[in-house]
Amino acid sequence: MTSNNLVSIKKPNGRPLAYVAPIADKIIQRMINGECLLKICQDHNMPSRTTVYKWIKENIEGFSDRYAYARELMADFYAEEILEIADGDPNNDSPEKIMRDKLRIDALKRYVAKIAPRKYGERQTIEHEGEVLIAHRILEARKRFAEPIQPLCISEE
């Protein structure tokens, strides 16, 4: 292919494009064991993330529901991982290791709160002080709508 007019054709890399139940099962199982989708899809025999997202969107054989459940269980896995890191090895508590563990814990806490916000996210409360006089506001609104609208007069000078 020395000619500039010829285009080289890239061979597919062997990744599955169509939904394959055993591969989908492996993806779900690996996620439950704490492996993120990015790492799973880097394996040559696994589909690309785009393909997996397509399976989620199309909910083939309930894959979307299984994926959501796997993410919840992955959050539980990481929550337990946080506890393991926090317990650590008391014989190996160098300042560098402590800082690295703190960084890992912070990153995992944020990630867990993101993938399972109902279970691990921060609770938000809204407090209100004072009174809400809705009846007064309704009467004001009714008066405004009852008044006739004054036409605009534009004078030509």
Image (spheres, grey):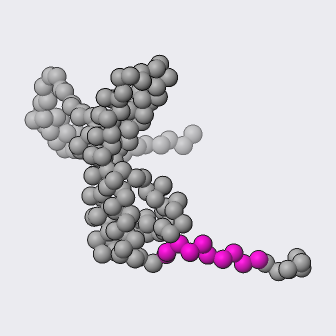
Name the dominant secondary structure of the magenta segment. Answer: loop
Count the labels in the image.
Answer: 0
**14 left or right of 150?**
right
Relative to 121, residue 95 above or below:
above
Which residue is at the far right? 3
Give the residue displayed 24% in from the left and 33% down from the top. Answer: 124
**Quarter-of-image position of residue 55:** bottom left
Q: Quadrant of the N terminus?
A: bottom right
Camera-side residue: 39 or 144? 39
Q: Nearer the viewer, residue 26 or 71?
A: 26
Q: Residue at x 18, y 26 (%)?
A: 128
Residue 152 image point, x, y percent: 40, 43
Relative image position of residue 140 (x, y in whole percent): 17, 35
Highlighted magenta segment, given as a residue range: 8-17
What residue is shown at x 23% (from left), y 34% (from top)? 123
Residue at the far left in the pictured view: 135
Question: 130 left or right of 93?
Answer: left
Where the C terminus falls, by quadrant? Answer: top right
Q: Is residue 97 above or below residue 1?
A: above
Q: Is residue 147 visible?
A: no
- Provide residue 142's location: percent of width, then percent of height: 16, 42
Q: Residue at x 33, y 43 (%)?
A: 78
User: Which one is nearer the viewer's eye here, 143 or 67?
Assistant: 67
Specify whether residue 40 is in view. yes
- Magenta stretch encompasses residue 71: no
Where is residue 137 shown, x and y percent of the image?
Answer: 16, 34
Residue at far top of view: 95
